[in-house]
Image (cartoon, grey):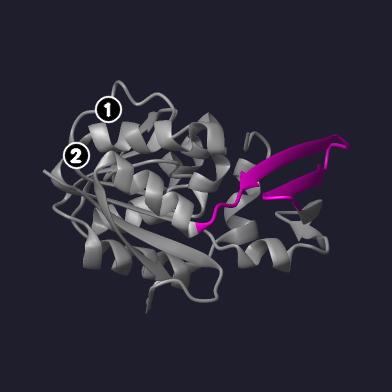
Amino acid sequence: MYNQLAKHYDSLVKDEQATCSYVDFVKAHAKGTNMLELACGSGEISLQLAKAGYQLLATDLSEEMLEEARKKDVDHLVTYAFMDMYQMEQAKMYESIICFCDSINYIDEAHIEHVFKQVYDHLEVGGTFLFDMHTMDRLTEFAQEFYEAGVVDGTDYIWSIIADGNRLLHNFVFYEKDGSTHYEHHEQWVFKPEYITDVLQSLGFTVSIWTDFEQAGMVEGEKYFYVCQKEG
């Protein structure tokens, strides 16, 4: 996953305003400064949080994405590590754990409780778990296939997204300058917020939800932001 996409990821989706909004959201809701980031991707949010004073271990399942993140961090402000959020045994205890850019949506229903339990077990009492997920509106948005073609970093590409049941299917094709063609397929699962809340509460979290950063509660939008606190 993200083998070929990693080197083009920022050019395709980088949004400095969104990065600032994520950082502000963390500042508003996270406990403490000792933080674990799951699925850090290319490290845009990681680096800005480190510059804001957070002590961050940023992890990802893609070595290629971690390499892109390390390239940006010229002052070595962030500690990066390969880690699967399904298997967090090597992680320590943290005041806060974060996972953004709808990365939780890569987890299917069979494993979502397990991942949340891993997070719970690595949070200090009173610690916070912050993450975002696609809203159900995204399934309607992509009921008809989204299709984008263009040139990124001198490479021709095609990107399509379509909803299939409760999944979003992403397909990428990159036509490289050397004549090679690379394909990547990504699947994301979209969940009702009531279900996610029930799972989190059953594990011992208190939960509040925001929509698109600033709107309290569940309203129409692209993303739900979950603010979860580990109870004592």
Look at the image and tell me in which quarter the C terminus lies.
top left
Going by the numbered disc 2, the residue's amino acid type is Tyr
Task: Give the residue number, with chain letter if any, for mark 2.
Answer: 94
Q: Position of residue 70 (x, y in %)?
A: 42, 40
Q: Quadrant of residue 56?
A: top left
Please, is residue 183 above or below residue 191 in the view?
Answer: above
Query: Which type of secondary structure does the marked residue at label 1 adopt?
Result: loop
- Residue 62 seen from this side: yes
Query: Which type of secondary structure does the marked residue at label 2 adopt?
Result: strand
Residue beneath the point at 63% across and 46% down: 188
Q: Position of residue 11 (x, y in %)?
A: 62, 58
Label 1 environment density (alpha carbons within 10 Å; few <14, some 14–19, many ≥20): some
Q: Which residues are magenta?
A: 164-192
Q: Position of residue 138 (x, y in %)?
A: 65, 64
- Residue 74 seen from this side: no
The main secondary structure of the magenta stretch is strand
Q: Position of residue 150 (x, y in %)?
A: 81, 61
Q: Nearer the viewer, residue 83 or 175?
A: 83
Please, is residue 110 above or below residue 26 in the view?
Answer: above
Confirm or deny contact between disc 1 and disc 2 (CB under 8 A). yes
Q: Nearer the viewer, residue 118 or 90?
A: 118
Residue beneath the point at 25% across and 57% down: 51
Q: Nearer the viewer, residue 14 or 110?
A: 110
Name the mark on residue 91: 1
Q: Is residue 201 magenta?
A: no
